[in-house]
Image (spheres, rainbow, N blue to C red):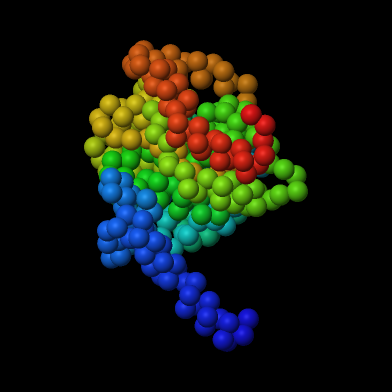
Amino acid sequence: MGEAGRAFIATYFSQDSLRTALAQSYEQIFNQPMRGQSVLESPRSQPLVPTTVRLGHVPRTTVVIPVYNAPDEVRNCIASVIRHTDLARNQIVVIDDGSPDPAVTPILASFSQIPGVTIRRNAANMGYTKTINAAIVEAGSDDIVLLNSDTIVTPKWLEGLRAAAYSREKVATVTAMSDNAGAFSFPTFNKTCHKPDHLSHEEYALLMTQATQGCTPPEVPTGSGFCMFIRRALIDEQGLFDHEGFPRGYGEENDFCMRALKAGWLNLVSPWSFVYHVRTASFKGEKAALVKAGVDVVTKRYPDYAALVKQAFDGPEMTILRSAARCATKAPL
């Protein structure tokens, strides 16, 4: 690009100029001043666009990746997080919970010298919930993302989670959209939504988040630990995950989110973050029993849990989000 063209683009299409133009548009729509605010607000005082001004004051984020076997998935996951995460202002903590598969150790060692990446190994298997609790404590005052080691993240995945987490005052958790995460699968609920072969992971994620960027983050009673952002303020108030009730995982995030909900916090789904998920790579053959045990504990503690889940995932905000994703992929109803 020539110097004149570069100067033109820098003047009229920089982030600052686009932000100013957006503010001017909202001023005309709502007939009230908008410029100079940390967020653009509607007359109902609901944040519409969380900006870098507001996000600049949030804590650093520690991405916690618990590992148990599944070496190929682990390699792909960590590589994607390093590629798509700003490690100058965030950090990655990988914890091997005593994997018996010998292939895991050299894979983790290959990432150990990368700045911003910390590799830990439990001397003996502690179980998923104790492992993540230890990492949360070690992270100090940081916000937390729990990320399964059988995921692949995509461009701006963390920014999309963080934007939703700080879009309202008391957001406890934010879960990403996924191709294969049960109720958090998009565009089709509870199904594996295969990526078209001709698109890369990054291209398909961009297609999805472009289609859903105007959607409101739906409120849900629970997030999903495959990729869940947790605000430190919530941890400081409500404490850690229940490792006694859910020692090996499955159900611990549901209990954690319901505790937050009962205390007046919100759990959201981010329309601006898309993360791929293999599912059950670490606990092959055991998932059904683990899920049943976890669900039994959750439903005994929260008799209204099932009704809240149905209401949220059938609700209008979720329907709009799924419809936007479906239009992008032209998936059938």
Q: Could you tell me which quadrant the N terminus lies in?
A: bottom right
Q: Is residue 5 above or below residue 80?
A: below
Viewer-proximal residue, 24 or 196?
A: 24
Question: Is residue 263 something that shows in the picture?
Answer: yes
Q: In front here: 114 or 58?
A: 58
| Total count of labels | 0
* 214 is higher (above) or lower (below) than 269: below
Q: Residue furthest bottom?
A: 3
* Residue situated in front as seen by the camera: 256 or 178: 178
Identify the residue at image location x=32%, y=54%.
30
Q: Position of residue 21 (x, y in %)?
A: 41, 66
Question: Quarter-wise, where is residue 173 in the image?
Answer: top left
Using the image, determine if residue 253 lies above or below residue 79.
above
Is residue 131 found left or right of 113 in the rendered image? left
Q: Is residue 138 left or right of residue 88?
A: left
Using the rendered image of the protein, determine whether residue 253 is visible from the camera's viewpoint: no
- The spot of residue 205 in percent (x, y) is 60, 48
Task: Residue 228: name its quadrant.
Answer: top left
Q: Residue at left 48%, top 33%?
A: 318
Q: Nearer the viewer, residue 69 or 79?
A: 79
Left or right of 249 on screen, residue 80? right
Q: Position of residue 147 (x, y in %)?
A: 49, 41
* Picture layout, residue 4 above or below residue 251: below
At x 44% / y 47%, what residue is drawn?
161
* Residue 65 locus on image (x, y percent): 49, 43
- Quadrant of the frame with the C terminus: top right
Q: Is residue 303 found left or right of 97 in the rendered image?
A: left
Q: Residue at x 67, y 35 (%)?
A: 331
